[in-house]
Amino acid sequence: MNPSQKPLFWTAAAVVLAALTAYVVARQTAEHHEGHAHVEPQDDSGDDFHEWLHSQLEITPEQESQLAPIERSYAEKRGTLLKVIEDAGHELAKALELAQVDRAEIDAALAKIHNAQGELQQVTIGHFLEMKEALSPEQAAMLLRWTRESITHEHRP
């Protein structure tokens, strides 16, 4: 590698690492959200978001029926966006494997990743705000507090 390619290589490597990290976080979050429309937890950890809603917010059967279509819609949108992120990550990796790096291909893949990540954030926050409407004021306050703490990494079990 010649010296003029080193900054591009390290920049691309950092972006790939960031994209992969975002993908992994998104996939782990997916595991917590995909079970929303189900009563059974997805794993044995007890951290399933749906279970948390029921235990902490004391979701009633009526609220559950209101939340179910919201959860299904969110899961569908989220799944689509995660697939876009995954596909763009593969495009980025492929572009970085080439002997002659094509900056336009790299930039296009990065743009797809960033756009989908931004849209996923908007969809997720919109999802929580939509859920809030089916909750009592006390439950909504708890959900918004949990969401804020999750964003700022202050959430404690």
Image: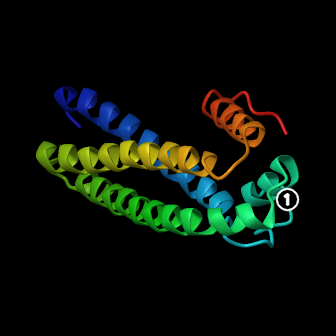
> Residue 93's x, y, as percent?
32, 55
The quadrant the C terminus occupies is: top right
In the figure, residue 86 lies in which quadrant? bottom left
Task: Classify 10 Å Cα crowding around label 1: few (below 14), some (14-19), many (20 and above).
Answer: few
Identify the residue at image location x=85%, y=47%. 56
In the figure, residue 143 lies in which quadrant? top right
Identify the residue at image location x=73%, y=44%. 136
Task: Return the residue nearer the eye: 15 or 3.
Answer: 15
Q: Is residue 16 left or right of residue 108?
A: right
Identify the residue at image location x=75%, y=33%. 155
Amino acid type at circle 1 is Ser
Q: Is residue 1 left or right of residue 127?
A: left
Colour scheme employed for the rendering of this structure: rainbow
- Does residue 21 appear anywhere in the picture? no
Classify 54 as above or below 140. Answer: below
Q: Is residue 138 left or right of residue 18?
A: right
Identify the residue at image location x=51%, y=42%. 125
Task: Return the residue nearer the eye: 77 or 3.
Answer: 77
Task: Return the residue nearer the eye: 19 or 54.
Answer: 54
The quadrant the N terminus occupies is: top left
> Residue 8's x, y, as percent?
24, 32
> Residue 58's x, y, as percent?
85, 53
Q: How many marks?
A: 1
> Residue 96's x, y, as percent?
27, 50
- In the picture of the structure, the residue carrying the numbered disc 1 is 45
Mark 1 element type: loop
- Does residue 142 appear anywhere in the picture? yes
